[in-house]
Image (tube, helix red, strand yellow):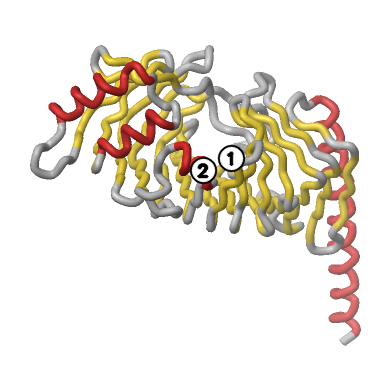
Amino acid sequence: MRVILTTLVLAAVGYGAYWHISARSLDTEISATLARSEVISVADYTLRGFPHRFDLTLNAPRLHLPDATITWRGDVLNLHALSYQPHHVIAVFPDLQHITLFGQDWVVRSPDARASVVAARMQGGSLDRANLVFEVPEFAQGNQLHRADSLRASLTQISDAHYQLALELSGLRPDAAVRAALGATDTLPPLLARSRVMATLEFAEPLQVNGRLPTVQDINVTDAEIIWGDISLQATGRLRPDLGGTVSGQLDLRVTNWDQGLALMAAGGMIDPDATQMARMMLTAMSDRETGQLDLPLQIRQSVMSIGPLVLGHLPRL
């Protein structure tokens, strides 16, 4: 019995020493990373969790990419990892977040917003997979408020710098003012049945958990779908961004009830008004007369969308 008790005491002391040594090393690494980082800044932080976890609390965190295409801020960000699995980190976001995407400011509310990041153990901290879940989120922009049942995203390493992206927004309910502006109040239900994207991304180099975000060199859209009432849109294709943030490539579209979709895009300003009538004539000739289904290639050159010689509009810079 004395041997067993002695062994247990030595194991507990050894584990406690391991946690404190690891915590001290982690604290030094966090401090150095924050001091030199051009991407993230915090007011201060605390590190706790003894004996089983590492619990890092970042107060007033700010995320800002150098080109300012994406910024994020919140009151607090909590990061958790088991002491025996430090390569697997769980992030718990605040209920209220401020996000800027390509010049558009959004306020996001969600009572349960979490993410997980898993680093590959044998590859020097490269990203193995990441997941993001927002339950019953609200997205506010100006006076508009959009609601959804859930937002789910995942990024999984396939090989080297290639990653599989999955994005799904379930139960999206656009703001009533948006539906009214699109003329969809009486023609489309308030709920989008489905909106999802599956794509393979090629980065300039493998993603590093603690490193900068490398540029995206290739986007292979393998499955994208939006279903809203009688309108359905499916897309596959490949896009290549350039250093200036514009993209070029082609998306092969399959559209059902395309004429109603065209009217919505025109009303929402997604298509140049002068091109709408010509687009309707061209698409009528290209669509299946029996089913009304439309298959067409959407050409994108330096973020300018076109069908043949007809220019439809511009995509935002990445």
Residue 37, quarter of picture: top right
Residue 85, quarter of picture: bottom right
Q: Is residue 225 above or below residue 95?
A: above
Picture coordinates of residue 161, whole percent (x, y): 49, 31
Taking the image as shown, residue 16 lies to the left or right of residue 275, namely right
Q: Amino acid at mark 1?
A: Leu
User: Which residue occupies 47% across, 42% down?
Assistant: 180
Taking the image as shown, residue 237 lies to the left or right of residue 125, namely left
| Residue lying farthest to the bottom in this orientation | 1
Tell me the quarter of the image containing the N terminus: bottom right
Q: Is residue 121 visible?
A: no
Q: Which label number is shown at residue 119?
A: none
Q: Nearer the viewer, residue 306 or 252?
A: 306
Picture coordinates of residue 302, whole percent (x, y): 42, 13
User: Which residue occupies 24% across, 19% down?
Assistant: 278
Q: Which label number is shown at residue 155?
A: 2
Q: Amino acid at mark 2?
A: Leu
Question: Disc 2 or disc 1, which is closer to the eye?
Answer: 2
Dot 2 or dot 1: first in sequence order is: 1
Asked if the residue at tag 1 contacts the one at tag 2, i.e. Cβ–Cβ closer than 8 Å, the answer is: yes
Q: Is residue 78 visible?
A: yes
Picture coordinates of residue 52, whole percent (x, y): 79, 63
User: Which residue occupies 89% across, 80% down?
Assistant: 5
Taking the image as shown, residue 312 lies to the left or right of residue 171, namely left
User: Which residue occupies 18% across, 40% down?
Assistant: 293
Mark 1 surroundings within 10 Å by alpha-carbon count, few (fewer than 14), some (14 through 19), many (20 or more): many
Q: Is residue 233 above or below residue 203?
A: below
Q: Nearer the viewer, residue 121 or 127?
A: 127
Residue that mark 1 sits on: 127
Q: For mark 1, give the secondary structure.
A: strand
